[in-house]
Image: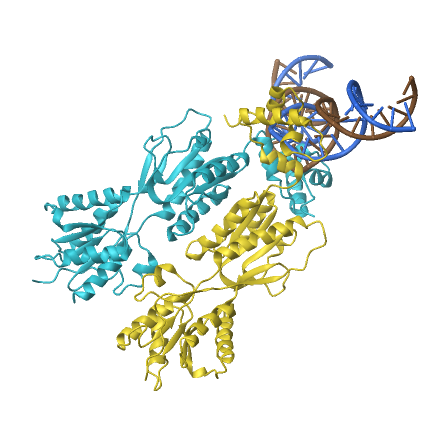
Chain colours: A yellow, B cyan, C brown, D blue
DNA sequence: CAAGTCCTCCAAAACGTTTTGGCATTGTCT
DNA sequence: AGACAATGCCAAAACGTTTTGGAGGACTTG
């Protein structure tokens, strides 16, 4: 039922050998086929609606033109889609297909998934996590080109790409500093993840960059949720000398900060400026006023991962290249929650 | 570099022929291999860490153990993930791998994508849309087992699964009716999509089911957004005899309704009960009070699609089976936005 | 005119499996 | 004892490509 026409049928119809058809179709170098014949073959192939069997050519070439994309949790996060989309687009550009697996964070499922990918002879593997994490690279990834997406490993054995948390936080702070704010609270998160440390460092760097001291009393860590944001913001805003600006670890915490501000009768942005992080459009776009925040480069990281993987595959023959770590820009997206501080 | 060990190496190491290895590994019926030999082969294979090349077996068997998952826009929607996750899990159960393609809604990309999938000899294709839509099945899907996911086609040529919009809306209305509400406004959407008609019918059916008349004046359509919800709700809530309950087309519109209620000084749920649709956790979980809403069965639809596709593949040899359309339950998820109506 | 060089094409092998048909060997019936 | 069936194994073909190593002819060169 499925495409019964193979290269043989094309050859017969064109009155040449399969060799010639293959050469013509793949436009092999060395001019092994007459231009006129080539055109004829091409025409016949198109006419018959011939589509080469990639399984067969993959078998012959020892490469499948597919790459595996394995990730922990694809579902819960709205970021996953963007990463996948970026990977998708880049893959298409390279003529690659993406085989997706998700492990639900289960190590055994992960091992099985990688095994399955290897059996299907994927040319390379993207190992992705849905939140920026530090991970242990599974051994099964050793024998094949692979890159880490939104994750780094301490052993630095693989190329990796992550968001530039540091730069993003600094940009957010700069946004407030540039507007004239001097007392700026940092509604931080308390998990031991790279983002926490990175963003805190960015905050400090921003103050330093403006020649201002960093006051630890203005950093309050809480659970990374709306409620956590509410609590931390409340604490900061009831300080004797309350901050005029708040930089929140993420948009959900910023949402909590909005509620705290509302309860305290503080108008945003007139009385209080707020900057978030993540650019969760569902939140930042719907809050009133709309939230200025920092965008995570998920799409770009997806693109980067595939491109880098492609390079990795290409030079798999050479000795292994230096696995570099990349951090991609987190641009600020300006909306309506930042204004100059009120005149006190 | 990659798994240099094939079935031949296993055969050599076990001192048998490749035939026997294959028979042993695939546990072929007809008792063509001694149990003892079988065990030895298995042991050797495990020892050598042998993993069969699925490209080769696929070539031989004319089936790849992969299925294509092609969808319009994977990125923007938080629903995509759940659908994919369901598909993923079901696929794993069947020993299938998912090759994902997205078309960005572009017909040409779609054609190319399907073409690529066919070249890779996928055993079947899931054609998914990220919002329940009515679509035209592309011709290129004709020759291969395929199912529609979150979409139906007028020609009814393929099995399809969609959410039971009608039932979901009826359940939502029932929630309000059961709480004692009688004047219930429907904040509807104005797009010509299946959900619009389906949910409206559900609303009418719910009234009918309670022996109540349906009052068209209490249905207001608006743009499907927070602002649209705000406008429509405002209109309904300023009616001479204002509704005590609101059923909103989706959670975003419900969010607008919340704002309208707040501006009118109506407390939810004491003065006004609200039910949404979609269960967008980012919204429904963060609204105060938390929103009672109806859940779209994306995960289940994903599972269903793969299972059905698997059946379709299995009986591809028989005549084509009757392509049935399925609508999956949209269960209500109760939170805190519904209470009995105020005593007037 | 002989020798070399292109140009165009093809036959055959190979990629790693699965499956068919058959060959010994052993056991079981008459 | 002879015929027959069952058991356990294997050789070889096949799946649809790509690539290697020529073959044959036409053309160029000295």
Q: Is residue B332 above or below residue A226?
A: above
Between residue B153 and residue D3, name the one nearer to us: B153
Q: What x and y, as percent, mark residue B121?
A: 54, 34
**Which residue is painted at 43% across and 45% down in the image?**
B104
Q: Quadrant of residue B180?
A: bottom left
Q: Is residue A223 left or right of residue B272?
A: right
Q: Quadrant of the C terminus of chain B?
A: bottom left
| Depicted B136 relative to depicted A167: above or below | above
x%, y% of residue A133? 52, 64
Where residue D8 sits, quadrant-wise, is top right
Which residue reaches farthest bottom? A240
Instruction: Name the residue rendered at 54%, 49% in the picture.
Output: A90
**Residue B221: horizontal and vertical position, in percent?**
20, 49
On screen, residue B39 versus residue B175, left or right, reads right
Residue B68 in the image, given as x and y percentages of width and height: 48, 40
Question: Image point 34% across, 61% down: which residue?
Answer: A285
């Amino acid at each position: 039922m499925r495409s019964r026409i193979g290269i043989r049928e094309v050859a017969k119809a064109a009155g040449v050998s399969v060799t010639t058809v293959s050469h013509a179709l793949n436009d092999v170098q060395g001019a092994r086929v007459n231009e006129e014949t080539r055109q004829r073959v091409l025409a016949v192939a198109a006419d018959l609606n011939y589509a080469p069997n990639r399984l067969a050519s993959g078998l012959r070439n020892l490469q499948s033109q597919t790459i595996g994309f394995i990730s922990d949790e694809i579902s819960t996060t709205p970021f996953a889609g963007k990463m996948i989309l970026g990977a998708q687009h880049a893959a298409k550009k390279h003529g690659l297909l993406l085989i997706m697996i998700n492990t639900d964070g289960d190590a055994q499922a992960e091992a099985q998934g990688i095994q399955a990918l290897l059996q299907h002879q994927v040319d390379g593997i993207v190992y992705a996590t849905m939140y920026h994490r530090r991970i242990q690279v599974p051994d099964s990834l050793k024998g094949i080109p692979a890159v880490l997406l939104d994750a780094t490993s301490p052993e630095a054995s693989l190329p990796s790409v992550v968001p530039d948390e540091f730069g993003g936080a600094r940009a957010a702070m700069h946004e407030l500093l540039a507007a004239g704010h001097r007392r700026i609270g940092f509604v931080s998160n308390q998990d031991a993840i790279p983002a926490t440390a990175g963003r805190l460092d960015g905050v400090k760097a921003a103050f330093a960059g403006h020649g201002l001291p960093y006051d630890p009393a203005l950093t309050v860590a809480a659970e990374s949720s709306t409620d956590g944001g509410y609590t931390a913001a409340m604490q900061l805003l009831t300080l004797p000398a309350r901050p005029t600006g708040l930089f929140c670890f993420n948009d959900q915490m910023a949402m909590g900060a909005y509620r705290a501000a509302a309860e305290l009768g503080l108008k945003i942005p007139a009385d209080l400026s707020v900057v978030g992080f993540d650019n969760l459009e569902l939140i930042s776009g719907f809050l009133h006023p709309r939230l200025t925040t920092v965008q995570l480069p998920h799409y770009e990281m997806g693109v980067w991962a595939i491109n880098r993987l492609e390079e990795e595959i290409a030079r798999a023959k050479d000795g292994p290249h230096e696995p570099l770590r990349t951090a991609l820009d987190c641009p600020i997206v300006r909306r309506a929650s930042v204004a100059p501080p009120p005149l006190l």
